[in-house]
Amino acid sequence: MRKSKPKKHVTLTWRRRAPLALQLPARIAKYELEEYLGGGMSEVYRARDTVIGRTVVVKILTEAGCADPDAKARFLQEARLAGNIEHPNVISIYDFGEDSLQRPYMVMEFLRGEDLRHAIRENHLGDLRAKLKVALQVARALGYIHTLGITHRDVKPENIHITPAGAVKLMDFGIAKAQGLSMTRTGFVVGTPYYMAPEQVLGKEVGPAVDIYAFGILFFELLAGLRPVTGDTVERIFYAILNEPLDLLPLKGTVPAAVCDLIAACTAKDAAARPSSFDAVAAEIERIQAQMEAPAPATATMPMARAAAPPRAKSARVKPWLAVALGIALVAAIAVLAKMALAPGHRPDTRAPAGTAQQAPVSTALPATLSALGGDMVLVSAGPFLYGQAKKPVTLPAFYIDKTEVTNAAYLQFSESAGHALPPGFPADKPDDPVVNVTIDDARAFARWARKRLPTAQEWEKAARGAQGRLFPWGDERNPQFANVRDNPSLTRHEIMPVGQFPAGASPYGALDMIGNVWEFVEETVKPDPANVKGFAQRMKPPPGPRELWYEIRGGWFGMNLADPSYGGAWDYSAVPARWEDHVIGFRCVKDALAH
């Protein structure tokens, strides 16, 4: 009889495992169970989908698990949360149901490879570049679930899987927390001790910052091969987390200083001092990767100083009159140089002693435009701006935003490169029109391919309104001549137009078409208006469910009247369900600005 292996962070007593409820081979719905893989409160099987022939994993909650309200609630939550996530770095949940004994089960992607714990222990990860690629994929996966309002709360090597091709898969959403949903009793701490943030240890209300902290600990372990936090008891581990600074000495000299700085920032005791999002974390890793790949700057080869002059054939003495002449010339030269140094407008170079090589200062100014996959981007400078209808002061770091909406030509390039399906009715003969009929997940996929992301509502609005909170990109005047809208008197046809047709309507940063033409997705969930839900229920099959996420769309479209006072301007928005696609909704991307 086989014994189940308990997870290391769970306190269990060793006992002989009860006989399996199912004698193999067995069948649940269309899934043929072929091999028992392990388990505890759940039994995990390798199985075959008999309809399409795909190998899958079936996870079934045991009778003991069903009898434990907490275990059952977490099993159901994992199925619900993970089942709504589609991301290349997150494990896929294909199906969910109950077996003949009314035990819930879920059907998951079958993963080949190993978990990160085993890969670290066996030194399977490769060099620093390969490890950074793993860390970047983990950051992207966590960043994505955060956009869905989900905090994982149990980030650790055992919950990261690496396929033989090097692809990362985030797993185990058993204790993940969605916005507005909490199953944790007050004062009850969940998570694995070594990776828990201080606020998690203290049993405080937690948010995405706990995942950023855990990522920092995991990143350290990924690079150093050992945990930065140790202790013989949970109490000792918690004391270290709360009171002792992280010792980065094992990494010093083996990784770039920027990596150490990033880990230190992620593991700050104060949650507010950590990076604001995984987008910022991923951008910093990408910057480090780019620096590592950049060729070393060419340096001039200086001749080495000789220890002694070579012997001369004859000894030569300097004539007395020549020595006097040379002395006079030297004094005159010094006087001229001194006069030049004191002249108005002349400032001597005091950066290095005379005789040492001088280096031109490196400019840290960010370029106003940036060439990138999918089209040119314009810089939105760092600083405060006035946000929303109430013009609330908000401060953002610098970032780049696409100058126009993503075009059909750019999307076609992405589709051919990434193997992503084109939208229905894709007009290949209109390469300069904005791409439409895409879901927000399609837009995210394009952004990942282009090494960008979708803008937040704040980023989109600042790029459109400027720092002073204009009503429209061009100012506060409702002038329809600056946009592709229905009441533009210069337009005889009301339809989607090629991007960039209204340069006079540019935003203060140079972004075009931010009002009219097509709506644009932003990475902002919103509670929909009941009337909106009712309208979409008549247009969608199946209709939107109560837990379905809705996302803001910004900027309006070609069929609206700018003079209509019901449209508030650049701060205003509508909302659509996550799986909605429409012939008047497109998107543009942003990218964090990196100092050079």
Image (tube, rainbow, N blue to C red):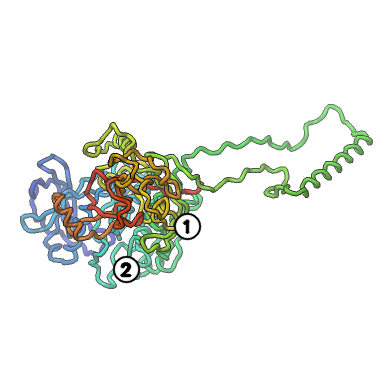
Which image quadrant for residue 148?
A: bottom left
Indicate whether 188 appears above or below 368: below
Residue sitting nearer the eye, 97 or 394 = 394
Question: Alpha-carbon neighbours of circle 1 within 10 Å: few (<14), some, or many (≥20)?
Answer: few
Indicate whether 120 appears above or below 150: above
Mark carried by residue 383: 1
Which image quadrant for residue 243?
A: bottom left
Question: From where the camera sits, is residue 224 visible?
Answer: no
- Looking at the image, which residue is at 24% across and 71% down? 185
Q: Earlier in the sequence, mark 2 or mark 1?
A: 2
Residue sitting nearer the eye, 310 or 278 = 278
Mark 2: amino acid:
Glu
Residue at image mark 2: 205
Tell me the SS state at disc 1.
strand
Place of residue 440 in the rendered image (x, y in percent of width and height, measured from the top left): 27, 48
Tell me the SS state at disc 2.
loop
- Looking at the image, which residue is at 28% across and 39% down? 493
